Amino acid sequence: MLIRTFFCALALHVGTTHALQTDTLPAARLYELSAELARSAGSSQWQQLWKRTRDAGYFQSSGEQARFTLPMAVIPEMVRDTLGRADSATAQRSTMVLYRRDFAPRVTGVETQKNLTAICLQVDWRSVPDNPQAEQMVGAILLLSYPCR
C-alpha cells in the first residue's frame, strides 16, 4: 500500500512538473501545437470532445444559450479547421488554450438570437510534455467546442 501511494504521488509530481505551460509560450508555438494536434488527434479525443460539447448544450436546437446552427455534417471539419488554422490562441490558466477561428460571413451559431460567426475550441495541454513528439499529442484533451463571437 505504501509503495503504491509513493508511485501515485511520484506520477502526479512528474505529470505536473512536465506539463506544457501554455501561459509562458509565444503565440507562434501555440499555433504550431494546435496544427500538430489537428493532424494527429485520435478518434477517442474527438469523441470525448463531441460528448462534452453535447452535454454542455451546444448542439441543442433551441434556447438562449450559445448553440451551433450549422448542419451536423460540417461541424467536425470546421472544428478541426479551427484547431489547425486558428485566428487566435489565448492561454487560459497554466495549461489551457482557447483557439478561435472566424468564419464570417458564415454563421456558425446563435446566442440570445444574435448570429455568431466563429468557433472556439478549448484544449487542455496538461498531460503533454514540453517539446512533445507527435505520439505524445494523445495526452492533449479537446475539452469543448462552441460557436462564439
Image (spheres, rainbow, N blue to C red):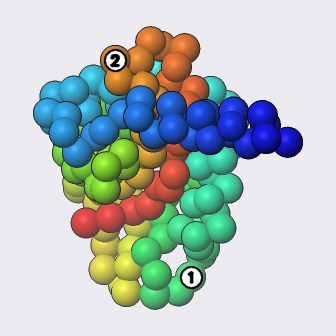
| Residue 43 in the figure: left or right of residue 57 | right
Farthest residue toward the right? 1
Q: Quadrant of the N terminus?
A: top right
Q: Which mark is residue 129?
A: none
Tell me where residue 43 sits by quadrant: top right
Q: Position of residue 73 (x, y in %)?
A: 60, 45
Q: Quadrant of the C terminus?
A: bottom left
Residue at the image point whose x is 35% and y is 23% from the top: 130
Q: Which mark is residue 62?
A: 1
Q: Secondary structure at mark 2?
A: loop
Residue behind mark 2: 131
Tell me where residue 26 sits by quadrant: top left
- Which residue is more in the foreground, 80 or 92? 92
| Residue 119 in the figure: left or right of residue 56 | left
Q: Position of residue 96 (x, y in %)?
A: 37, 49
Q: Compared to 96, does 52 lie above or below?
A: below
Farthest residue toward the front? 2
Q: Position of residue 4 (x, y in %)?
A: 78, 37
- First-in-chain label (2 vs 1): 1
Q: Compared to 74, does 136 lie above or below?
A: above
Residue at the image point whose x is 44% and y is 61% from the top: 146
Q: Compared to 23, does 55 lie above or below?
A: below
Residue at the image point whose x is 25% and y is 49% from the top: 91
Q: Secondary structure at mark 1?
A: loop
Q: Position of residue 56 (x, y in %)?
A: 58, 70
Count the marks.
Answer: 2
Q: Name the mark nearer the viewer: 2 or 1.
A: 2
Name the amino acid type tagged 2. Answer: Asn
Say if residue 137 shows up in the picture.
yes
Name the amino acid type tagged 1. Answer: Ser
| Residue 149 in the figure: left or right of residue 145 | left
